[in-house]
Amino acid sequence: MERDYLILAHQYYDSSIRHLESEDDLRLSYAALDMRLAIEATIYKKCEMLGQFKEELPKNVWQPKPLLLRIEQLHPELNTKMKIAVAIAESDAPPSNESEWIQFPIDIKILGKDYGTLGGYVHMTTPHDLESVSYDKIRKKLAEIIERWAILVKSWHFTVTPRLVTNNACKSCGTRLLYSEDFIIQRKTIRCLSQDCGAEYKINQKLELEYLSAFEIPCMHCSNVMDVHKSQIGKYIDQVVIGKQPSLILECPVCAGKTKGFVGISYESKPHGKI
Ligand SMILES: [Zn+2]
Ligand SMILES: [Zn+2]
């Protein structure tokens, strides 16, 4: 088995085409699965190109879209269009045999959409859809995705050493915040790389980080004011939805005192005259 993601991406991509061209409906799910693996290998190749910086990525983040978001923040050059042309000339003669390598960027939205669509084809058709499923439609959709990724799977990869900014810690989880100087020239926000955090920071005019908090809560143990991030609110609501007793625990970064938050219900007095 090959150990190079670029070669693996090519192999799974070609295998996906073979399944699709077999005209066998039973092999459509294999075509979708192999195309998914080709996409994963393409993103993992970019991950490898991070070199020593790949250690900064959380190990439990494996899905292509969240991974590419993090790769872009650390090393935006790995997902921008670049071209290199090399020509060899003998003495003063004009160069012949010019070679060109082009790196094409992957659109994060298309990545998420295509990867999700392919995921839908690797399962058994549900009872509700069994009568109406159209294998021709699936075949057409797969052909579209395979064509769109032809150039991306086989694109060359360039790398230069990223200029990383490393001197801030996340206000939400304490993890070191890492981003490339070039990334903040292109984007207005950066994210905490940690999988469970998702805190976001706005880059202001002076290229400083501004924590995007949802609201502030004073610490009851000292005079510090703590930020509550929108991802913490999201997690709280997720707990409510799955029927768990929700809680929001904040640890003060100054005094380490803990504060627990709850959503409450308040009863108001009823209007006069109503029973
Ligand atoms: Zn964080
Ligand atoms: Zn405190």
Image (cartoon, grey):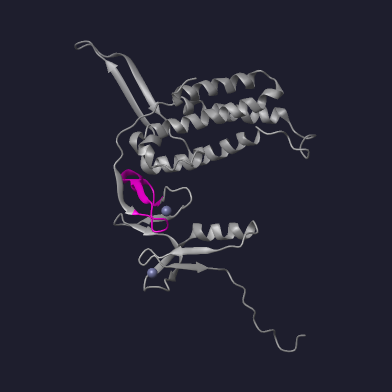
Q: Where on the picture, by quarter, is residue 226? A: bottom left
The percent coordinates of residue 40 (x first, y second) are: 51, 32
User: In the visual, does 146 lie left or right of 44?
Assistant: right
Left or right placement of residue 45 versus residue 127 in this view: left
Q: Position of residue 244 (x, y in %)?
A: 62, 59
Residue drawn at (43%, 74%) of the image: 220
Classify residue 118 by image quadrant.
top right
Residue 114 in the image, given as x and y percentages of width and height: 57, 36
In the image, residue 227 above or below residue 187: below
Q: How many marks?
A: 0
Q: Residue furthest right?
A: 131
Q: Is residue 106 magenta?
A: no
Residue 17, quarter of the rendered image = top right
The magenta stretch is 169-190
Along the line of sight, the residue nearer the viewer: 216 or 205: 216
Image quadrant where one finds the C terminus? bottom right
Residue sticking out furthest to the bottom = 273
In the rendered image, the vertical position of residue 204 relative to residue 110, given as above or below? below
Q: Identify whether 195 is placed above or below 99.
A: below
Up-down relation of residue 257 to residue 231 (above or below)? below
Residue 105 at x, y = what percent? 43, 34
**Is residue 189 within the magenta segment?**
yes
Image position of 26 (left or right of 188): right
